Image: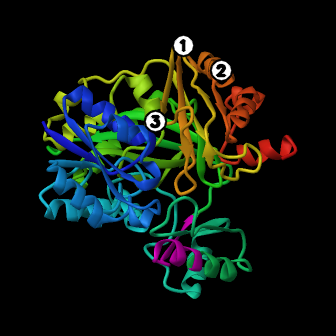
């Protein structure tokens, strides 16, 4: 096992990794920008090093500064958390060159799965179900038109290097294609420095389902079931739950077995999430893979009782899967997570500032992952996540009731939060009945006059 790990992140996920390390007896090193000097991850780490000014490019995304901090602190490994450098293959390579273990997959695997079109091709070859679409990158508008006629409308063009909904356009007819293709190319080039696009059949009213896996460095892969992530706005998830009411035990076993086989074939290790769209016939279609821990990982932890972050660390230290998780993973109950963001609940505009009062919910079956506290500051430079509120119940109905109660008892003052929005979602009859898809929030806001 490692003696000391540097956490190349901030906020609640940095604190989450610190908790895992403390339980494993590992010393921790926090890095922080000048804006995060008083953050809790700085306070609770064994050591802390300031790596630059508030701007991301000069601090948390500054690879030389992060590596220098790791070398100064003499750490053996770096945990990247999620976001920031977590899926940066170049960073993983620099860690490797510097003799520091990157807690994540090999750089070449990260790079493969990070390029959406290549990941799609690799999954197709491994037998994972995918949507009909182009064979590779589309070189021109003319080629796009040829593929569109082959795939059929509606379709979606996507950035190969994309994420977060950028570089994506839904195309419903031939007349729209040239303009939307140009717009998606420009947006992708601006956002990712890569304007390459590919094309897939567009699924109307899909559900967003993702599978959690763990893979060790010895070729063993296990699936820990799925999460339902359909409650999202502009491709940004707001609420997640596990398991999905739409995935049968047979489908769960079938997809889990395919994923274990395919990921072992490409030599994947670490925690990983494979994302799918479910069509109205309840068929799953691969869309992308995230080669890191996810924001919503706690709902899987709550129903499986598997600590995913500790598992990541143990795998990176060379542990076999049998030392990491039980031979038989049993999912018990139902879990829901609400992301509490510092945003106006109706306008979705950021709300940076000082938290004047903070009282997280508690009680049976309630978990709060946060780095916020009363008199703490939400800086304007970073993600607006304040906390993740997670509950577990014996079934979905109890989990929904428990979440509604917990949201009512969660107090944050001084900044706007999305708590009022979540309370309304939990009270919505369609949500409570499980009748939703990825377009739920748009319909919900329209219905409520927003």
| Above or below for 193 versus 16 | below
Crowding at dot 3, Cα within 10 Å, few <14 / some 14-19 / many 20+, comes out as many
- The count of marks equals 3
Q: Residue 119's x, y, as percent?
A: 38, 62
Q: Nearer the viewer, residue 287 or 281?
A: 287
1 or 2: tag closer to the N-terminus: 1
The numbered dot on residue 409 is 2
SS of the residue at dot 2? helix
Q: Is residue 289 magenta?
A: no
From the viewer's perspective, is 133 left or right of 307? right
The numbered dot on residue 85 is none
| Residue drawn 45% across the image and 68% down it | 161
Q: Quadrant of residue 71?
A: bottom left
SS of the residue at dot 1? loop
The numbered dot on residue 226 is 3
Q: Residue 91's x, y, as percent?
A: 28, 63
SS of the residue at dot 3? strand
- Judged from this view, the residue extending furthest toward the right is 449
Crowding at dot 1, Cα within 10 Å, few <14 / some 14-19 / many 20+, comes out as few
Q: Residue 28's x, y, as percent?
A: 24, 39
Q: Nearer the viewer, residue 71 or 393?
A: 71
2 or 3: tag closer to the N-terminus: 3
Callout 1–callout 2 Cβ contact below 8 Å = yes
| Residue drawn 20% across the image and 36% down it | 27
Q: Quadrant of residue 427?
A: top right
Q: Nearer the viewer, residue 373 or 257?
A: 373
User: Magenta region: which residues?
Assistant: 186-200
Evaluate whether residue 296 shows in this view.
Answer: yes
Residue placed under numbered mark 1 in the picture: 363
């Amino acid at each position: 096992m490692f003696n000391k790990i540097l956490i190349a992140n901030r906020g609640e996920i940095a604190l989450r990794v610190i908790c895992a390390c403390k339980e494993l007896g590992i010393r921790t090193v926090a890095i922080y920008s000048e804006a995060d000097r008083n953050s809790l991850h700085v306070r609770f780490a064994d050591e802390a090093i300031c790596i630059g000014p508030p701007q991301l490019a000069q601090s948390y995304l500054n690879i030389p500064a992060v590596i220098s901090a790791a070398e100064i602190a003499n750490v053996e490994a770096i945990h990247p958390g999620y976001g920031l450098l977590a899926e940066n293959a170049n960073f993983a390579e620099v860690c490797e060159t510097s003799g520091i273990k990157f807690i994540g997959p090999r750089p070449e695997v990260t790079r493969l799965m990070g390029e959406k079109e290549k990941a799609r091709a690799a999954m197709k070859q491994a037998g994972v179900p995918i949507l009909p679409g182009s064979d590779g990158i589309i070189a021109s508008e003319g080629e796009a038109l040829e593929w569109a006629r082959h795939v059929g409308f509606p379709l979606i063009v996507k950035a190969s290097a994309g994420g977060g909904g950028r570089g994506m356009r839904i195309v419903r007819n031939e007349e729209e294609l040239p303009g939307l293709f140009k717009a998606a190319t420009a947006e992708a080039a601006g956002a990712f420095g890569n304007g390459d696009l590919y094309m897939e059949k567009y699924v109307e009213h899909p559900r967003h389902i993702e599978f959690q896996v763990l893979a060790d460095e010895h070729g063993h892969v296990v699936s820990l079931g799925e999460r339902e992530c359909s409650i999202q706005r502009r491709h940004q998830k707001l609420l997640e739950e596990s398991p999905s009411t739409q995935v049968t035990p047979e489908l769960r076993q079938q997809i889990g077995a395919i994923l274990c086989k395919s990921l072992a074939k490409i030599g994947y290790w670490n925690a990983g999430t494979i994302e799918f769209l479910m069509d109205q016939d309840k068929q799953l279609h691969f869309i992308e893979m995230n080669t890191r821990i996810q924001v919503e990982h706690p709902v899987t932890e709550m129903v499986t009782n598997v600590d995913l972050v500790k598992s990541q660390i143990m795998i990176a230290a060379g542990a076999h899967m049998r030392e990491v998780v039980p031979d038989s993973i049993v999912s018990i109950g139902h879990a829901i997570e609400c992301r509490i963001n510092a945003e106006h609940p109706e306008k979705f505009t950021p709300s940076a500032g000082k938290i004047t009062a903070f009282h997280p919910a508690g009680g049976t079956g309630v978990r709060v992952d946060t780095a916020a506290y009363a008199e703490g500051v939400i800086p304007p430079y970073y993600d607006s996540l304040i906390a993740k509120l997670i509950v577990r119940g014996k079934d979905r109905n109890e989990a929904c009731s428990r979440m509604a109660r917990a949201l009512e008892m969660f107090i944050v003052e001084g900044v706007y939060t999305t708590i009022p929005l979540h309370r309304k979602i939990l009270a919505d009859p369609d949500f409570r009945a499980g009748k939703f898809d990825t377009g739920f929030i748009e319909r919900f806001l329209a219905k409520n006059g927003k």
